[in-house]
C-alpha cells in the first residue's frame, strides 16, 4: 500500500467535484424552422392562429391560448416597440457582450408576442419603454438560419409608441 | 441549405457541480484518498458499503465506520467489450457488484479481468488504487478491481 | 388495496387514450408539434374539448431535451388560457396519471388530461440516464442503463431463475405481437434461436433484449362521476392504483426480485380477481420474468400483447402507454380485467401498478 502519511495533514474530504456534460443534436421542429429559415433570408416570420387571429413570433407551432396548430405564415415588419428592458451590469460566466448592455423585449409591428433582443446605439440611461426600434442585420452573405443574423436593434427615430398600444404585452 | 433539410444545432449542457458530501459519504471518500475502504454499521449489525446516512431497509441512522476489503466477492458482473467514452476504463472491462470482505452490501465498480472468460460470479477480486499522489477522495481513486492473486 | 379502503376508492375511468406513432427519430417536429395531434385525438375520441377537463398533469424530463422547464412549452399544445390548474412530474406519465387520480379521489375534480412526451433521439440516453444515479458513488463512473440491466440479468441467470434462451423467447414473442400494433416501432417475426446468434452488447444482454430508442408521446383522459358515464357507454375503471420505491443503493437490493412491484400489486389488489391481460413496462427482456413474478401472474395471462417496451420505448411515455394499452384491451372487449405496470430508475427501482376493470 502506498505511503499515505501526507493524507492526515489534508483533513477530511468535505466536497466532491462532479462535473457533467451532455451533448444534444437539437432539431427545432416545423414552426421554429420557418422562423429560422426566415432569418436566413433577412426577415422575421411569424404564424397566425386561425381561431383568435394572434400572430406569434417566434412560433412554436401552436397557439398557446387555443391549443390549435398555427399554420398561416406571416412576415413581420423590421420595426417594433420596446415593451420593457433591462440594463445588464452584472458579470457572469460565459458573458459575450461587454457590460453594461441593454436587453429588451421587442414587439414587432404586427406581432402579438414580444421577444428578447440586444439594443445598441443608445446610451443606457436613455432607454425607455415605448421606444421605436429597427433590426440591424448582418451582411447578406453572413445570413444564417439563426438569431445571430440579427446583430441588434437600434432606435429608428420615430416618436415613442403610446403606452396604450403595447400595455397588453407587458 | 435546401428547405426540405431539417435544421440541426449542436447543443451542450455543462455544469461544474461541487457537492458537499457530509460526514458519512465524506468519511468513505477520505478513506479512498487514504487508500482504504470503509463501510458503515446499519440496522441489525449489518455493514453497508458504500456508506449511506440511513439504513436502506429500516431508515434508521447508520452508525460507526468499519474498515472493509481490500478484497471481496463478485456478486454479479457484465462484460463491456466496447467501453463508452465516459466509462472508468477505456479498454474492455467488466462492471461488477462487489461485496467486500466484511460488508453485507455490494458496491459498483469496474473489474479489469483481461477478458470475459476470466471472470465469474463468486470470484474474488481486490482493489487497485491509483498512486497516492493522484488520489483526491473520489470513486475514481480506485482505478479498478482485479482478480485476486493477479490472474489477469 | 385493503378491504377497508377499497370501498372508499372513487371510481375513475380511463375515458380516452391516444399515442403518437413511435419512431426512432422525429427530426421534423418539436415536442409541441408531436403532442398536438395526440391531444386532439384524445379529446376527439370522446367529443370533448380542453374546457371539459378540470386539471392537466404531464410527465416528461428536461434532460431529454437539454433545457429547463421544457414541460411549460408543452402546454402550448393544450392552450392554457384562461389559466388552468396544472401540474408536472419529472417522471413517466404514469406517475402524472397517479397524481391526477389522487386529485380525482379527493373529489376536487371530475376530469383530467394527462400527457407525456420525449425525444430520446436528441441526446445520448446512455449518458443522460447515468445522471439519475447516486451522484457520489455511481454517476461519476457513468454506468449506462444497459450495463446496469446486464448486471441484473446476470444475477437472474446465476440464481437459476432464467436463461438467455428465456430472454430471446420473450423478445421474439413481443416483437411478433407488435406486428398487430400500428403504433409499434420495432415489429418483426424472428425466432428465438436466430436471436441467440447475435453477439453480446453487454453480456449477458444481446441487442434483441434491449429496448429501441424512441421519440413519442401519449395522452389519457380520466373521468369520474357523471362524466365517466357521459363519455363512454362501457367505462374502463381504475379499481386499484399504487406505487412503491426501493433504495437507490443498487448493491443493497436483490436484483432478481421486485419487492416494490409486489408491494404495489398487493396494495392495488391485483390478486383480488382474474387477470386477463398485463401490459408491463419492462424495457429489458429479462425484466419481464421479474415483474411477472412480482405481480403474481401465471402463464394464462397475455403479457404485453401490444409488443411492450421492446417494440417501442418512448422514455417518459412508455409507462403511461402501458396503462392506455391495457385499458384499450378492456374497451375492445378482449379482456375484462387487466394490470398495467410502469417503472422508473435503474433495474426496476421504482414501480407503479394499476388495476383496470370493465363492466
Image (cartoon, rainbow, N blue to C red):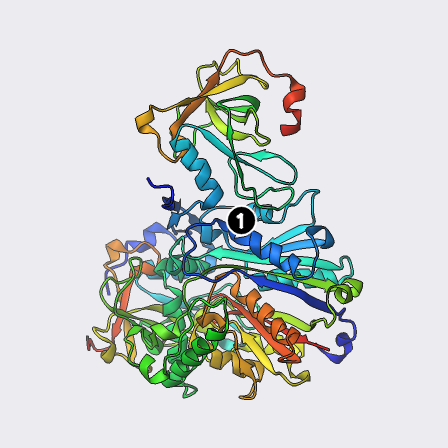
In the picture of the structure, the residue carrying the numbered disc 1 is C32
Considering the image in quadrants, where does the N terminus of chain C appear?
A: bottom right
Q: Chain of mark 1?
A: C
Q: Position of residue B74 (x, y in %)?
A: 34, 77
Residue B16 lies, with reference to residue B38, above or below; the image says above
Q: Name the residue at 65% across, 78% down.
A: C333
Q: Name the residue at 47% across, 70% down.
A: C309
Regarding residue A120, the answer to whether it shows in the image is: yes
Regarding residue C245, the answer to whether it shows in the image is: no
Between residues C166 and B113, which one lies in front from this camera angle? C166
Quarter-of-image position of residue C135? bottom left
Q: Is residue C120 left or right of residue B146?
A: right
Quarter-of-image position of residue B35? bottom left
Q: Name the residue at 39% across, 69% down.
A: C148
Q: Residues within 10 Å of mark 1 (few under 14, many from 20)?
A: many
Between residues A97 and C165, which one lies in front from this camera angle? C165
Between residues C194 and C339, which one lies in front from this camera angle? C194
Q: Is residue C102 left or right of residue A37?
A: right
State the residue lying farthest toward the right.
Answer: C226
Total number of numbered discs in the rendering: 1
Q: Position of residue B37 (x, y in %)?
A: 35, 67
Q: Is residue C25 left or right of residue A112?
A: left
Q: Position of residue C245 (x, y in %)?
A: 56, 69
Amino acid at each position: 500500500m502506498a505511503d499515505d502519511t501526507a493524507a492526515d495533514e489534508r483533513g477530511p474530504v468535505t466536497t466532491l467535484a462532479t462535473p457533467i456534460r451532455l451533448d444534444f443534436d437539437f432539431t427545432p421542429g416545423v414552426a421554429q424552422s420557418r422562423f429560422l429559415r426566415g432569418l436566413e433570408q433577412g426577415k422575421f416570420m411569424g404564424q397566425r392562429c386561425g381561431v383568435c387571429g394572434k400572430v406569434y413570433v417566434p412560433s412554436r407551432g401552436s397557439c398557446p391560448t387555443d391549443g390549435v396548430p398555427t399554420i398561416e405564415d406571416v412576415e413581420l415588419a423590421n420595426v417594433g416597440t420596446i415593451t420593457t428592458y433591462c440594463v445588464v451590469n452584472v458579470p457572469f460566466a460565459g458573458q459575450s457582450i461587454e457590460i453594461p448592455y441593454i436587453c429588451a423585449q421587442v414587439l414587432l409591428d404586427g406581432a402579438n408576442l414580444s421577444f428578447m433582443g440586444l439594443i445598441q446605439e443608445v446610451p443606457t440611461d436613455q432607454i425607455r419603454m415605448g421606444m421605436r426600434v429597427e433590426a440591424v442585420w448582418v451582411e447578406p452573405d453572413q445570413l444564417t438560419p439563426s438569431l445571430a443574423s440579427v446583430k441588434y436593434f437600434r432606435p429608428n427615430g420615430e416618436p415613442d409608441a403610446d403606452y396604450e398600444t403595447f400595455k397588453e404585452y407587458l | 441549405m435546401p428547405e426540405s433539410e431539417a435544421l440541426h444545432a449542436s447543443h451542450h449542457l455543462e455544469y461544474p457541480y461541487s457537492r458537499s458530501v457530509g460526514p458519512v459519504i465524506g468519511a468513505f471518500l477520505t478513506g479512498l484518498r487514504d487508500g482504504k475502504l470503509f463501510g458503515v454499521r446499519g440496522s441489525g449489525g449489518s455493514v453497508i458499503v458504500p456508506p449511506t446516512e440511513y439504513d436502506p431497509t429500516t431508515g434508521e441512522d447508520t452508525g460507526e465506520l468499519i474498515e472493509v476489503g481490500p478484497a471481496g466477492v463478485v456478486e454479479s458482473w457484465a462484460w463491456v467489450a466496447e467501453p463508452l467514452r465516459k466509462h472508468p476504463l477505456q479498454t474492455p472491462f467488466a462492471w461488477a457488484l462487489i461485496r467486500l470482505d466484511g460488508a453485507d452490501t455490494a458496491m459498483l465498480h469496474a473489474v479489469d479481468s483481461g477478458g470475459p472468460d476470466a471472470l465469474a460470479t463468486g470470484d474474488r477480486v481486490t482493489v487497485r488504487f491509483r498512486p497516492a499522489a493522484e488520489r483526491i477522495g473520489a470513486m475514481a481513486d480506485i482505478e479498478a478491481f482485479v482478480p485476486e492473486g493477479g490472474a489477469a | 388495496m385493503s378491504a377497508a379502503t377499497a370501498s372508499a376508492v372513487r371510481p375513475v375511468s380511463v375515458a380516452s387514450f391516444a399515442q403518437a406513432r413511435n419512431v426512432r427519430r422525429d427530426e421534423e417536429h418539436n415536442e409541441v408539434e408531436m403532442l398536438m395531434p395526440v391531444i386532439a385525438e384524445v379529446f376527439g375520441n370522446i367529443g370533448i374539448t380542453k374546457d371539459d377537463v378540470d386539471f392537466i398533469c404531464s410527465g416528461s424530463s428536461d434532460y431529454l431535451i437539454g433545457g429547463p422547464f421544457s414541460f411549460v412549452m408543452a402546454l402550448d399544445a393544450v392552450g392554457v388560457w384562461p389559466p388552468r390548474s396544472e401540474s408536472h412530474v419529472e417522471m413517466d406519465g404514469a406517475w402524472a396519471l397517479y397524481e391526477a387520480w389522487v386529485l380525482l379521489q379527493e373529489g376536487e375534480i371530475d376530469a383530467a388530461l394527462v400527457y407525456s412526451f420525449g425525444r430520446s433521439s436528441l441526446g445520448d440516453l446512455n449518458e443522460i440516464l447515468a445522471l439519475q444515479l447516486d451522484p457520489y458513488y455511481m454517476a461519476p463512473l457513468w454506468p449506462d442503463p444497459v450495463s446496469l440491466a446486464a448486471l441484473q440479468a446476470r444475477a437472474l441467470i446465476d440464481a437459476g431463475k432464467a436463461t438467455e434462451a428465456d430472454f430471446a423467447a420473450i423478445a421474439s414473442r413481443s416483437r411478433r405481437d407488435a406486428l398487430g400494433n400500428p403504433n409499434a416501432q420495432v415489429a418483426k417475426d424472428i425466432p428465438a434461436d436466430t436471436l441467440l446468434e447475435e453477439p453480446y452488447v453487454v453480456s449477458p444482454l444481446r441487442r434483441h433484449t434491449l429496448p429501441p430508442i424512441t421519440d413519442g408521446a401519449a395522452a389519457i383522459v380520466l373521468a369520474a362521476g357523471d362524466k365517466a358515464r357521459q363519455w363512454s357507454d362501457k367505462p374502463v375503471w381504475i379499481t386499484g392504483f399504487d406505487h412503491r420505491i426501493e433504495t437507490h443503493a443498487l448493491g443493497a437490493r436483490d436484483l432478481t426480485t421486485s419487492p416494490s412491484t409486489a408491494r404495489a400489486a398487493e396494495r392495488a389488489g391485483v390478486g383480488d380477481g382474474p387477470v386477463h391481460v398485463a401490459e408491463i413496462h419492462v424495457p429489458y427482456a429479462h425484466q419481464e420474468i421479474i415483474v411477472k413474478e412480482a405481480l403474481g401472474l401465471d402463464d394464462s395471462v397475455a403479457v404485453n400483447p401490444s409488443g411492450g417496451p421492446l417494440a417501442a420505448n418512448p422514455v417518459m411515455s412508455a409507462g403511461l402507454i402501458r396503462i392506455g394499452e391495457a385499458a384499450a384491451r378492456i374497451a375492445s372487449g378482449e379482456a375484462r380485467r387487466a394490470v398495467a405496470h410502469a417503472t422508473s430508475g435503474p433495474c426496476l427501482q421504482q414501480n407503479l401498478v394499476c388495476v383496470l376493470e370493465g363492466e
